[in-house]
Image (cartoon, rainbow, N blue to C red):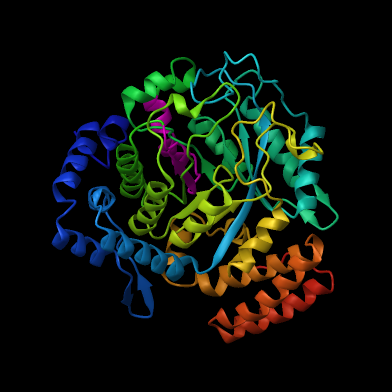
């Protein structure tokens, strides 16, 4: 029985409800009157001084996903772009993954870290190696990391993860510092989530991989990850442990995409219903080639066009939630989905343990093939030339604007008087400390233009003053 308020995985992610939703979507995919009413519900509305969005239920969004009418799809894309602009503007948050260890006891058939893979070189960073990786990332200009590790209670216990977080935060090299560490590790206990919260993490990220239980069990035949309920209920334990910013995601290509789409939105609805706040971010990775993994073995891959539609509809359905696209996607695809709702991008990523200190990109221990292999500086310059503001801001975490506090902050429009100024100031830091000359020139011109997009005159004056201070060597201003 479907119950979004239930704490049981099979009740808030109900197979019966997903199948009924897909059937309903098929019945109504040509019902233009219904589709128009769904689109109208999702449109931004003026509410006093603020713009608000109602979002969509998993069933309403699934009707739009099933719709194949070209004119209506154009409307969906235009609406996604309008919503993105209303709440996130043209800012794109930049981060990088940091792989700590590829030791893993699970048997996930789609991941090269699976225990039976004897080709891959197993490695776990020492604290000195963590330090070197972090300095390499700081020297690129990164301020925000997402740490990754395989599940192995002997090699990667929670104490190791906590020690790595402490090391990362302790390193100040030249003008570099990592100001926020997000964590993508296996489902764990409430007690361990409390420890992560106390360590000062930002968002806890855990991909479901697939919401289809039967497929999930086949894809995770051995290891602790085989437990579907324990994995699916992890976000509830994280929130019980005090982590109010959590990030969801599925690995598109493992199961039929319409099933996954409905399950993903149901999970978001569940978090909202139980905890009063939905996911802080949603990631949309697609299955990619890697050592011992051939994506052609899986027959549920999705086209670029379907991927773009999914991104647009996530933006429409959950308008206040950040959306992440990694370097799994190539430059062309990333450019398209930026307009449709994506608000965070990784740049200069290496997906192998110890990869940032290697002169050449290592391929023997990558978790997946990196499609976008440009440097961070090339990604930053590309974004600016497209009219986006690359943001290295981490202020909300450090000012306590997390969970429902961030969502109310986003909904009441204050994001333009805080996040946009913070983006410009952190971009200025990047331009002075790390950028190539051409990137620096493009960025200075962009900042000058974007100052006009700060609505509050007093805030704008403070930003102008702080930009001058940054030029004179001061760092880390924030609203």
Identified at 65% across, 32% down, the residue is 161
Task: Locate residue 231 relative to residue 380 in the image: left or right.
Answer: left
Q: Nearer the viewer, residue 389 or 180?
A: 389
Q: Nearer the viewer, residue 218 or 57?
A: 218
User: Is 86 rendered above or below residue 342?
Assistant: below
Identified at 40% across, 40% down, the residue is 302
User: Is 263 rendered above or below residue 72?
Assistant: above
Q: Is residue 18 magenta?
A: no
Q: In this rendering, does residue 2 appear at all?
A: no
Q: Position of residue 290 (x, y in %)?
A: 58, 28
Q: Quadrant of residue 232?
A: top left
Q: How many marks?
A: 0
Q: Position of residue 213 (x, y in %)?
A: 33, 26
Q: Position of residue 301 (x, y in %)?
A: 41, 35
Task: Locate residue 442 relative to residue 284 in the image: left or right.
Answer: right
Task: Locate residue 253 relative to residue 177 in the image: left or right.
Answer: left
Q: Quadrant of the C terminus?
A: bottom right
Q: Quadrant of the N terminus?
A: top left
Q: Residue furthest bottom?
A: 457
Q: In this rendering, does residue 426 appear at all?
A: yes
* Range shown magenta: 228-253
Q: Position of residue 263 (x, y in %)?
A: 32, 39
Identified at 32% across, 30% down, the residue is 212
Task: Locate residue 164 relative to residue 345 in the image: left or right.
Answer: right
User: Is 266 rendered above or below residue 417?
Assistant: above
């Amino acid at each position: 029985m479907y119950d979004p308020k239930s704490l049981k995985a099979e009740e808030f992610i109900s197979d019966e409800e997903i199948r009924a939703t897909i059937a309903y979507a098929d019945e109504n995919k040509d019902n233009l009157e219904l589709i128009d009413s769904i689109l109208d519900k999702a449109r931004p509305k003026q509410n006093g001084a603020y713009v608000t969005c109602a979002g969509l239920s998993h069933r309403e969004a699934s009707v739009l996903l099933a719709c194949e009418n070209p004119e209506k799809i154009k409307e969906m894309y235009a609406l996604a772009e309008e919503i993105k602009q209303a709440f996130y503007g043209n800012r794109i948050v930049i981060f990088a993954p940091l792989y700590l260890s590829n030791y893993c006891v699970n048997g996930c058939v789609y991941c090269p870290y699976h225990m039976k893979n004897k080709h891959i070189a197993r490695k776990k960073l020492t604290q000195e190696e963590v330090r070197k990786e972090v300095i390499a990332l700081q020297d690129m200009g990164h301020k925000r990391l997402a740490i990754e590790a395989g599940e192995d209670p002997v090699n990667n216990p929670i104490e190791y993860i906590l020690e790595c977080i402490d090391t990362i935060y302790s390193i100040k090299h030249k003008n570099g510092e990592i100001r926020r560490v997000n964590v993508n590790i296996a489902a764990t206990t409430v007690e361990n989530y409390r420890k992560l919260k106390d360590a000062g993490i930002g968002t806890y990220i855990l991909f479901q991989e697939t919401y289809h239980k039967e497929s999930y069990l086949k894809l995770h035949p051995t290891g602790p990850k085989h437990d579907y309920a324990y994995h699916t209920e992890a976000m509830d334990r994280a929130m019980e442990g005090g982590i109010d910013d959590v990030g969801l995601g599925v690995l598109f290509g493992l199961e039929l995409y319409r099933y996954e789409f409905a399950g993903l939105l149901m999970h978001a609805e569940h978090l909202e219903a139980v905890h009063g706040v939905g996911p802080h971010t949603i990631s949309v990775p697609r299955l990619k080639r890697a050592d011992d993994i051939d994506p052609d073995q899986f027959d549920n891959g999705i086209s670029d066009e379907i991927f773009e539609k999914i991104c647009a509809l996530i933006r429409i359905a959950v308008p206040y939630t950040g959306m992440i696209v990694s370097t799994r996607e190539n430059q062309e695809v990333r450019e398209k989905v930026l307009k449709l709702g994506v608000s965070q991008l990784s740049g200069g990523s290496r997906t192998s343990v110890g990869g940032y200190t290697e002169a050449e990109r290592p391929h023997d221990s990558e978790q997946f093939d990196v499609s976008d292999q440009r440097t961070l500086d090339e990604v930053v310059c590309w974004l600016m030339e497209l009219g986006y503001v690359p943001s290295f801001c981490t202020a909300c975490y450090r000012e306590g604007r997390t969970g429902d506090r961030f969502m109310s902050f986003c909904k009441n429009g204050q994001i333009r008087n805080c996040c946009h100024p913070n983006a410009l100031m952190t971009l200025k830091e990047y331009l002075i400390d790390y950028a190539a000359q051409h990137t620096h020139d493009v960025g200075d011109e962009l900042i000058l233009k974007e100052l006009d997009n700060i609505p509050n005159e007093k805030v704008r004056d403070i930003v102008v003053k702080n930009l001058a201070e940054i030029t004179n060597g001061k760092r880390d201003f924030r609203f």
